[in-house]
């Protein structure tokens, strides 16, 4: 079972009282992209979008989960 990265991002963003606009400004990822990831409209987000979001949220648990999901998907060690 794969985790829903978008739900994790939204949960942590709201716990930090951060708006999508603020996250967009900090991460340089467009608001629309963040919204689409959080709502699940984008089910396979690009690492190039996720990494700056993870850094902006200062959240290593999402990073570890994304790395594991990539390993599973591409059968990497």
Image: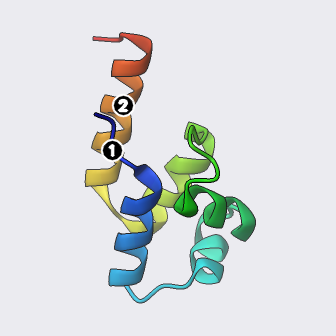
Q: Residue at x 68, y 64 (%)?
A: 28
Measuring from the top left, give residue 48's x and y in whole percent. 61, 41
Question: CA separation, marks 2 and 1?
Answer: 8 Å
Label 1 CA crowd tier, 10 Å (few <14, some 14–19, many 20+): few
**Number of the label disc, if any, that sits on residue 3:** 1
User: From what the image shows, is residue 15 above or below residue 53?
Assistant: below
Which residue is under mark 2?
Answer: 69
**Left-right relation of 11 to 39:** left
Q: Residue at x 33, y 36 (%)?
A: 2
Mark 1 secondary-structure assignment: loop
Q: Residues within 10 Å of mark 2 (few under 14, many from 20)?
A: some
Secondary structure beneath label 2: helix
The total number of labels drawn is: 2
Dot 2 or dot 1, earlier in sequence: 1
Q: Position of residue 22 (x, y in %)?
A: 60, 82
| Viewer-closest of 67 and 36 | 36
CB within 8 Å, label 2 to label 1: yes
Instruction: Identify which residue, 56 or 61, lies in the foreground.
Output: 61
Which of labels 2 and 1 is toward the front? 1
Q: Position of residue 61 (x, y in %)?
A: 25, 52
The quarter of the picture where residue 32 lies is: bottom right
Which residue corresponds to the image point at 30% horizontal and 42% vertical from the top-left?
65
The quadrant of the image that shows the C terminus is: top left
Question: What residue do we see at 60% from left, 78% from top?
Answer: 20
Judging depth in this view, the residue of 47 and 6 nearest the camera is 6
The image shows residue 19, relative to residue 73, as above or below, that is below
């Amino acid at each position: 079972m794969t985790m829903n990265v978008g739900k994790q991002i939204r949960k942590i963003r709201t716990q930090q009282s951060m708006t999508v606009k603020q996250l967009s400004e900090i991460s340089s990822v467009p608001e629309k992209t963040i919204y689409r990831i959080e709502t699940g409209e984008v089910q396979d987000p690009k690492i190039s979008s996720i990494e700056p979001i993870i850094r902006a949220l200062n959240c290593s648990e999402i990073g570890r989960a994304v790395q594991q999901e990539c390993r599973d998907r591409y059968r990497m060690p």
